[in-house]
Amino acid sequence: MNQEDLHAQLEYYKSLYKREMKKSKELTEQLVAAEQKAADAQFHLDNIHNSKIWRMVYPFRLAWSHFKNLFIRIKRYPNLKSFIKKVKSKMIERKAYEMYGTGSFPTEEVRKGQRDTLFSKDITFSILVPLYNTPESFLREMIESVLEQTYENWELCLGDGSDKEHEEVGRICCQYRDNDSYRGASRIKYKKIEKNLGISGNTNICYQLATGEYIGLFDHDDILHPCVLYEYMKVICDQNADYIYCDETTFQGNSINDMVTMHFKPDFAIDNLRANNYICHFSVFSSKLLEGKELFRSKFDGSQDHDMVLRLTAEAKNIVHVPKMLYYWRSHAGSVASDIQAKSYAIDAAKGAVAAHLTSSGFQNFKIESSRAFETIFRIRYAILGNPKISIMIPNKDHREELERCINSILEKSSYDNYEILVLENNSEEEETFVYYEQIEKNPRIQVLHWKKEFNYSAVNNMGEKEAKGEYLILLNNDTEVVTRNWIEELLMYAQRKDVGAVGCMLYYGNYAIQHAGIVLGLGAHRTAGHTHYKMGKDNLGYMGRLCYAQNVTAVTGACMMVSKKQYEEVGGLDEEFKVALNDVDFCLKLREKGYLNIFTPFAELFHYESQSRGRDDDSANKTNGERYEKECARFREKWKKHLEKGDPYFNVNFSLDYSNYVIGGGEHVKSMV
C-alpha cells in the first residue's frame, strides 16, 4: 500500500471517528435529557406518595377537607418563629409595592431641587419612541411622563407608523409638540412615517431625529419615573457612564401601583444577558457607541432590543446599573409584557440575536435552547474544546460509606471519561476506611494522597493541587453524589473560557431542596456570605427564572467547584488561614480581583448531604466549631471589608440580606428610592 493510500485510509478513519464521536455525544445528550425527565417525574411522584393526605384512609378524607387550610399552614410553618418571619417578609413586600409606585414620586420641593441642580456636564437626552396605533390614553400618559422629568434637557423623538384609522396619534403628538417650550424651542419632535417599517425601522426613523449626546429607548405604552433622567445624569457626571439601565416593574390597568412583577436587577452580568435580556428598560447610552453602527436591525424584529443591548454593551467602557425602580412597563392584551406568545416571532429573533453575539465573540458550535422558565430565557450549551484531563480532589477522613457513594456515582454516572480522582486522606482512624482505600486504588483512575497534619481544608486541597495531573480541577466534598450524567461537561464548557474563573453547580439536599445555587456576599446573619434560593424546591423557577439558566455570581461553593489549575495557582490557591469556613468564597473573590468571572450553572446537579463529616461550621451546639467559625467570619469581614460595604454586584441592594429568596428589603432600602 503506497503512501497516498495510507493517507486516504487515515483520513477515512479520522472522519469515521468524528462521526461516531458526534453520535456518541448526541446519544449522551439524549440519555441525560431522558434521565432528567425520569428524575423529575420521580421527584413529583415521591412528593405525592410522601404527603400526609395520600396516606390517610378514605373515611378521614371527607373530614380532612374541612381542616385542609389549617393543616397546610401548620405544615408550612412548623413553628411560630418561621410563621412570624414569613408574615414579616410579606408585610415588607407589600410596603415596598406601595413605595415603588407613585409613593416614590418626588414632592414639589424635591422636584424644584432636582430641576435647579447644576451638573458638571450639559447633556441632552434623546428619547426615541416608535408609535403604531397607540391608544390615546397610553399615548398621553407616555408623553406626560417625559414632560414630568425633573431633569429638563431632553428631546422626545416620535416616529409614527400608525395606519389611516389612527390619525389621532399624529394629531395628539403635534398638540404636545406645539405646547412645549424649553430654551425657546419645543423638545418634542414628530415625524409621520408613510409606510409602517416595523419596530426596528420606526425606531431608526426616530434616531434620525435625535441630536442628543445620549439616546434612550422608550416603548409607546409605558411610563417613566419623574426622576429617571436626573438619576441617569448623576451617574454620567459622577461615573462617566456610557450605558445605563435601571430596575423596572410590570403593571396592569390604569395605575402603576397595580404591579404584577418587580424586577430588581443585578449589575452588568454578561452570562445573564446572554441567557436573558434582563437589562431591557430603561436603556440609555452614549450616542458615540452607535457611530458607524445600526441602532436596530430589522432581521431581529421582536428581539431587536436584546440584539442592540448585546452589541452596545460589548462596546461600552462603563456600564452602570441604577438600582432604583424608574421604569413602568405596561401589561395589556397583545403586549410582550402580557404574553410572549402574543409575539411568538420574538423567540426566534432572540435566539438569533444571542447566536449573532456569541459568534462575534468567537464562540462556535454552541446550542441555544428555551428554558423551562420562559421561551426567551435560554440554556446555552458551549462546545467542549478538546478532551482535557480533569482532576477531582476529594478530602476525606473516615466516613467510608459517604466516600464510597460519592466515588461510585462519579464512576457510574459520568459521561466524561478523561479524569482522575484524588482522595485527600486526612488522619482517618477506622480500619474499614483503609481497607476501602486499598480497593479503590486498584482503579488506575484513583489515587489516595495523605495529609498527616491537622485538618485544614485549604491546605489539604492545596496539597492535592500540587499532585494533580489535570488541566482543570474539581474541588468536591465527600458527602456529595452525582445526579446528572454530563455534570463534568456542564462545568467544563464554562471553565474553558478565558474570562471565567470558578464554576459551581446546583446542589440539593437528599429531598431535592436546594442547598446551593450560587453565593451572595454579605448574605445571612454573620454578614459574610450565604447561598441563594436556599431550601427552595427543585421545581422552583427562582427569582425571575434564575434557577433556569447559567449566570454570573460572586462566588460558588467549594463543595463542588471547577477551576483551571493555571488560575488556581495564579491566585495562590486556597488561603490556609481559612482552615474550614469561607475559603471557597475568599478564593472566588481573589479570582474576581484578577478580572475573572465566576459562574453558577443549574445544569450540573449533585446531591450534597451537607457537613456530615464534621458537623456544620456554624453549629451552635458545637462550641468549638462555633468559635472557630466566628473567628474565620471576623477575618473574612476584615479582609473583604470594602467589598462587603459596596455590596454584592449580582444581588440588588433592594433585597434584604436577611433572606436567601430575594425578599424586598425594609425601610432603609425603600426610603433610599425617594
Image (tube, rainbow, N blue to C red):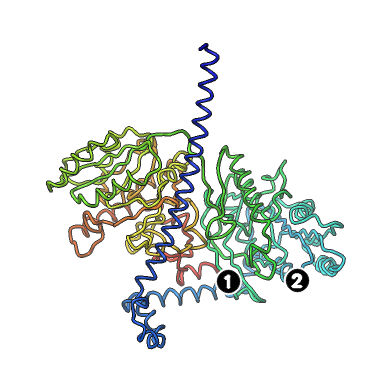
Vertical position of residue 534 compared to residue 17: above or below: below
Residue contact between numbered discs 2 and 1, judged by CB atoms under 8 Å: no
Amino acid type at mark 2: Arg
Quarter of the image where the C terminus is located: bottom right
Cα separation, mark 2 vs mark 1, equals 22 Å
Q: Residue at x 64, y 55 (%)?
A: 347
- Residue 276 occupies quadrant: bottom right
Q: Residue at x 42, y 50 (%)?
A: 604
Assess disc 2: are there few (<14), some (14-19) or many (≥20) residues with their C-alpha within 10 Å of its C-alpha.
some
Residue 288 percent location from the top left of the image: 68, 45
Element assignment for label 2: helix
Amino acid type at mark 1: Val
Element assignment for label 1: strand
Residue 369 percent location from the top left of the image: 56, 51
Q: Earlier in the sequence, mark 2 or mark 1?
A: 2
- Residue 446 occupies quadrant: top left
Report how many numbered discs are placed on residues in the image.
2
Vertical position of residue 396 compared to residue 14: above or below: below
Pick whichever, 286 or 624, lies toward us: 624
Pick whichever, 51 or 103, lies toward us: 51
Determine which of the numbered discs, if any, sits on residue 140 in the image: 2
The residue beneath circle 1 is 260
Residue 361 percent location from the top left of the image: 58, 39
Q: Is residue 166 left or right of residue 52?
A: right
Residue 508 percent location from the top left of the image: 36, 58
Assess disc 1: are there few (<14), some (14-19) or many (≥20) residues with their C-alpha within 10 Å of its C-alpha.
some
